[in-house]
Amino acid sequence: MKFTPTRTRLFQAMTLTAVVMASSAALAADKVTIMVGGYEKHIYLPAKLAEGLGYFKAEGLDVELLNEGAGVDAENEMLAGAVQGVVGFYDHCVDLQTKGKYVESVVQFSQAPGEVELVSTKHPEIKSMADLRGKSLGVTGLGSSTNFLSQYLMVKAGVPLGEFTSLPVGAGTTFIAAMTQDKIQAGMTTEPTISRLLKTGDARVLIDMRSIEKTKQALGGTYPAASLYMPTDWVEKNKPTVQKLANAFVKTLRFINTHSAAEIAEKMPKDFYVGDKEGYIKALADGKSMFTPDGVMPAGGPETVLSVLSGFSKNVKGKTVDLSKTYTTEFVKNVK
């Protein structure tokens, strides 16, 4: 067929349209929505830091980060198919397998919970977890990781599940209000909420799990916590996209491990400081050792999580859990 100038222009236009459509399809394939269980919390800092450093865009990813105050609610959004992944605690991967749902940590952010059990200074009589019998304990949400850890520590202290109350109060301002108003006498929370309550003198530390050593004392071993976890079937069908996410997050973890708390803080949204930048930096300096340097699951960590959950949960106790299916190192090991 002979190409006239008109036909040539038409062919070029059709070709250009095809290229644009193909490019749009490629971009659409790399659109990922991730829900974070409170992205202002230090424990989930890698999510907003990766965004702030431009690492998602550098990988050709269009990542939308949604904020949800409690990890259990973020988990439910993922299971409903509303989001592709969650930045939350690894223990959900273990818990969900006992319910026939397979999700896996694809990048392990931390090797300690970064959580603290705080006690209201209105109650000097409380000197141990056992003293919280009959009291109300604040957690981010029922079924959340703060709830899991609180229940474990209480049962370990000899207090049965029915002899204390877990009250969902979120984090930040809502947690602080619940404690100052004596709606909760103790509660588990993270930075920067911890520092805010300690600074005002409204709370004191009862159990500290911000470092690896103190976590081992409280829980009996390394406790892998914050992670990016995703449904196993989605991971299998979208490996190139998952690899790009792993690339971005591992580079972020390397940044955390090679930069000061002050340098990291400069990359975070200013409202995360809650009016106290100096306190934010200090808390981050004290706690950033909880982050893994490479996104790899720490050896023995999954076994500790299973042991903790088995200590109180009827869902987990006595169940067979294949821990090898609750996380993967395939993607983090491929990061250059």
Image (cartoon, grey):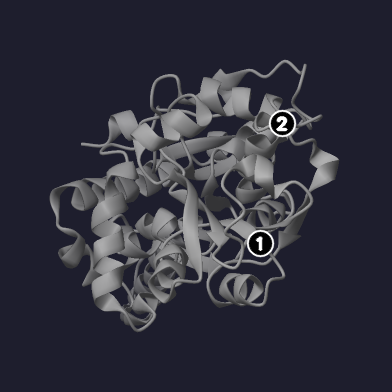
Tell me the CA gap for discs 1 and 2: 18 Å
Residue at point 65%, 33% (across, down): 157
Residue placed under numbered mark 2 in the picture: 158
Q: What's under tag 2, amino acid-wise? A: Gly
Tell me where residue 175 appears, x and y as whole percent: 60, 70
- Which label is found at residue 185? 1
Vertical relation: 324 (above or below) 217: above
What secondary structure is marked by label 1? loop
Residue at the front extreme, as displayed = 125
Position of 285 with respect to 100 (left or right) is left
In the rendered image, the vertical position of residue 16 relative to residue 144, given as above or below: below
Q: Give 325 or 195, whichever is nearer the viewer.
A: 195
Sooner in the amino-acid sequence: mark 1 or mark 2? 2
Residue 95 appears in view: yes
Asked which quadrant contains residue 44, the reply is bottom left
Q: Where does residue 89 sit, x and y in percent of width and height? A: 54, 44
